[in-house]
Image (cartoon, rainbow, N blue to C red):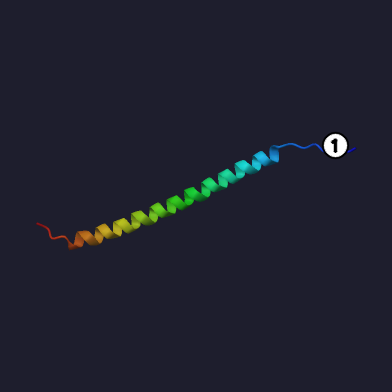
Amino acid sequence: MIHIAYTHWPYIAASYGCALLATLWLGIGLALRLHRATTRLALLERHDARRKPTA
């Protein structure tokens, strides 16, 4: 009978790869949302500053 050497290392590497990809995906998405939110907030504050009367 032929015995094929079987190890579990490909599954470990795949799980770490999936975890790394998921972390990168979520991190990049978070960075993009944060950038858009700060840009929108800056635009709102700039327009709001023009409307306020200076007293």
Q: Quadrant of the N terminus?
A: top right
- Residue 45 placement (x, y as % from top left): 25, 57
When the figure is inspected, residue 7 is found, relative to residue 34, above or below; the finding is above
Number of numbered discs visible in the structure rendering: 1
Most extreme residue toward the right is 1
User: Please, what is the three-letter code of the amino acid marked with disc 1?
Assistant: His
Question: Which residue is painted at 74% across and 36% down in the image?
Answer: 7
Q: Is residue 13 left or right of residue 7?
A: left
- Residue 5 placement (x, y as % from top left): 80, 36
- Residue 38 placement (x, y as % from top left): 34, 54
- Residue 6 placement (x, y as % from top left): 77, 37
Q: Is residue 7 left or right of residue 34?
A: right
Question: Which residue is painted at 24% across and 62% down in the image?
Answer: 47
Most extreme residue toward the front is 1
Q: Quadrant of the C terminus?
A: bottom left
Question: Which residue is painted at 65% across and 41% down in the image?
Answer: 13
Report helix, strand or loop for mark 1. Answer: loop
**The quarter of the displayed image where residue 50 is located:** bottom left
28 and 1: which is toward the camera? 1
**The quarter of the displayed image where residue 36 is located:** bottom left
Residue with the mark numbered 1: 3
Question: Which residue is painted at 85% across and 37% down in the image?
Answer: 3
Please rate how many residues cluster around mark 1, counting C-alpha atoms within 10 Å: few if below 14, some from 14 to 19, many from 20: few
When the figure is inspected, residue 9 is found, relative to residue 38, above or below; the finding is above
Q: Is residue 55 left or right of residue 12?
A: left
